[in-house]
Amino acid sequence: MVGGGPGDSGLLTVRGRRLPAEADVVVVDFDDPSLIGTLLDFLTVCVSRVVVLTATMDMSAFDAAVHKGLQGIVRKSDPPAVLLKAIEKVHLGELWIDRSST
């Protein structure tokens, strides 16, 4: 965890802004589709590849985020191995969208 807040991107610390730029893959814990604008803002400034870890059941909520560069979506109910595989695949440049939603 490099920084965070309840949806307000202004609550990220200076370190929290720098570290995602240095990471190969950033995993974002994101559960509130009403805050999708915050995720979209983050995607426009983050140069790293991004995977969302979510409990949200409606994957269509992430359509705009995928168009903005989101490379991975994993459900929190998936086994940990799925998240690890998604991180590996996204790191290799592949797109990883929750396989159970297809």
Image (cartoon, helix red, strand yellow):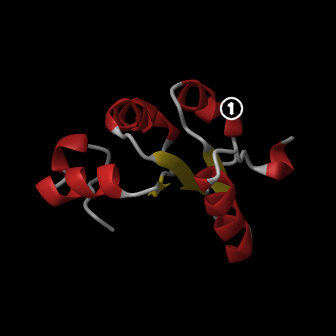
* Furthest residue in direction front, as rendered: 92
Question: Which residue was labeled with disc 1?
Answer: 60
At 69% from the left and 55% from the top, the residue drawn is 89
Location of residue 99 with respect to 86 vertically, above or below: above
At 35% from the left and 38% from the top, the residue drawn is 42
86 vs 53, nearest the viewer: 86
Q: Is residue 87 left or right of residue 24?
A: right
Location of residue 20 with respect to 88 vertically, above or below: above
Q: Position of residue 23 (x, y in %)?
A: 39, 58
Q: Quadrant of the N terminus?
A: bottom left
Asked whether residue 75 is in view, the answer is: no
Location of residue 82 with respect to 26 vertically, above or below: below
Looking at the rendered structure, the secondary structure element under dot 1 is: helix
Counting the numbered discs, the total is 1
- Amino acid type, residue under disc 1 in the picture: Ser
60 vs 46, nearest the viewer: 46
Q: Residues within 10 Å of mark 1 (few under 14, many from 20)?
A: few
34 vs 23, nearest the viewer: 23
Q: Position of residue 39 (x, y in %)?
A: 42, 38
At 66% from the left and 56% from the top, the residue drawn is 74
Q: Quadrant of the C terminus?
A: top right
Q: Is residue 5 left or right of residue 75?
A: left
Quarter of the rendering containing residue 101: top right
Asked whether residue 7 is in view, the answer is: yes
Q: Is residue 99 left or right of residue 53?
A: right
